Amino acid sequence: MCDHGRVEPLAKERDRLLQRSARTIGLGFSALSLIIFLIPGVVEPALHIGLLPLFACLTASFILLAKSRSLIVVGAGIISGLGILLVAQIPFDGNTSRVLLNAMAPVASGGLASFAMVLLTSKLRVTILAVTFLACLTVMATAAPGDGVPRVWLIVILGWSLITVFGYWLTASVPRAARRIYSIGRAHRTERRASETEAQRRQSARLLHDTVLATLTLLAHSGVGVAPEAMREQAADDARLLRQLRLGVAPVPTSSGQYNLEPVQETALGTTLESVKQRFGRMGLEVSWHGTGQVLLPSDVLDAFLLALAECLENVRRHAGVTDAHVTITDDDTTVRAMVTDSGVGFDIKNVDEARLGLKDSVIGRLSEVGGSARLFSAAGAGTTVVLEVPRV
C-alpha cells in the first residue's frame, strides 16, 4: 500500500478532531456572546427577535459541524455569525457602546474564527476563510468608535490568528507523524524479514551440514566403515530432505542430525500449498488461495504439480511487477487444476520465443512427465494466467 493509503485513516481521525474542536470553540464563544446580549440594556429588546434565531442557526451549524464539514454547514454558520454582528448594530448611529462591542467580540474573534479549523484543506476553503475574516474585520470596524477601531481589530486578529495557527498545525502535523510512524514500521518489518532470512539461512546450512554434506563426505571417502545398504538409505533420506526444502518446508530436527522425514506415498495437497504460500510470502509475494482445500495426489505427481506451481509464482515475483497473485485450485474425478493469475504487466506471447518463457522445462516438461499439461494466457498490460493440470491417479 502506498503512503497515501496508509496516512488516510489517520487523516480522517485528524479531520474529526478538527471538526469537534471547531464545534467546542465555536459553541463556547457563541454562548458567551449570547449571555452578554441578554443582559438588559445591551441592545434594544426588539433586536432579540432577530438575534435569537441567528444564534440558534449558528449553534445548529456548530453541532452539525462535528459530523459534517460540508460547505453548506460552514456557510450557514458564517452567514449567521455575520448576521449577528450586523443586527446588533441596529440602528447604525455610530454610538455603539463598549458593552455592545464586548458582546460582539466573542462571535467575531472566536465563534466565526473557529470555522478556520475546517477551512484549511483546499484553495476554495481558504478563499472562503479569507473573505470571512475580511468581512468580520469590516463589520467590527463599522461598529467601533473611531478611536476604538485599532483595539477591536487587535482583538479580532488575535483570536483568528490563534485558532488558525492551531488548526494549521494540527492539519499539517498529523500526516507527518503518520508517515514517520509507518516509516518506522516499514523499517522494523524489513529488519525482521532480514533476521528471519538470516536465521533460515543458518538453519538450512546446519541442516545440510548434518545430512547431505555428511553423506557426500562419506562418499568422498568411498563409504569406509558404512554398509552399502545404509549408504543408500541415507542418500534416499537426503533426497527427500532436499525435495522438502525446494517446496519451502522446514523440517524439524528431533535430535542433532535426525529429522522427521517419513516416507510419503500420498500427501494432502492443502498442507503443502500452505508451505509454498509461506515461502513466497517471505520473499514479498502475497499469494491468495481459492477453491479446493484438500486434495490427495501421489507423491511424484504432487512434487511435479507443486514445483511447477512454484515456478509460475516465481515468474510472477520476478517479472509481473506486482506484489500479489491468486491461485485457484479445482478438481474433478480425474484431474486437479491450478490457475495462477496476476494483474501485472503481462506480455505478447506471439513476440516471445517459447524457449524463453521459463515454462518449457520447469513447468511444461515437469508436468508432462507425470501426464499433466500447462496452458499460458497473457497480453501486454493485461496480466498473465497459467493453467496447470495433473491426473489424480
Image: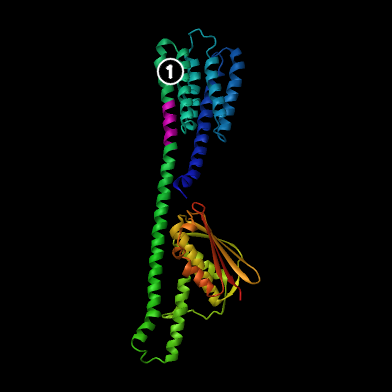
Looking at numbered disc 1 in the image, what kind of residue is underneath it? Val
In the image as oriented, which residue stretches furthest toward the right? 333
Figure coloring: rainbow
* Above or below, 100 relative to 359: above
Q: Quadrant of residue 268?
A: bottom right
- Residue 381 appears in the rendering: yes
In the image as oriented, which residue stretches furthest toward the left? 221
User: Which residue in the structure is indicated by mark 1?
Assistant: 152
Could you say where residue 163 lies in the image, as x and y percent from the top left?
44, 30
At 50% from the left edge and 19% from the top edge, which residue is drawn?
104
* Above or below, 159 relative to 101: below
Q: How many marks?
A: 1
At 41% from the left edge and 14% from the top edge, which residue is drawn?
149
- Which residues fall within the magenta stretch? 160-170
The answer to which of 372 and 307 lies nearer the viewer is 372
- Residue 251 appears in the rendering: no
Could you say where residue 316 lies in the image, as x and y percent from the top left?
47, 60
Is 254 magenta? The answer is no
Q: Circle 1: is it few (<14), some (14-19), or many (20+) Cα within 10 Å?
A: many
In the image as oriented, which residue stretches furthest toward the top? 93
Q: Quadrant of residue 326?
A: bottom right
The answer to which of 387 and 25 lies nearer the viewer is 387
Could you say where residue 253 lies in the image, as x and y percent from the top left?
45, 77
Residue 294 as seen in the image, left or right of residue 380? right
Helix, strand or loop for disc 1: helix
* Above or below, 213 relative to 18: below
Residue 318 as seen in the image, left or right of residue 28? left
Could you say where residue 145 lies in the image, as x and y percent from the top left?
44, 11
At 48% from the left edge and 25% from the top edge, which residue is drawn?
128
* Image quadrant in which the C terminus is located: bottom right
Tell me the chief SS of the magenta region: helix
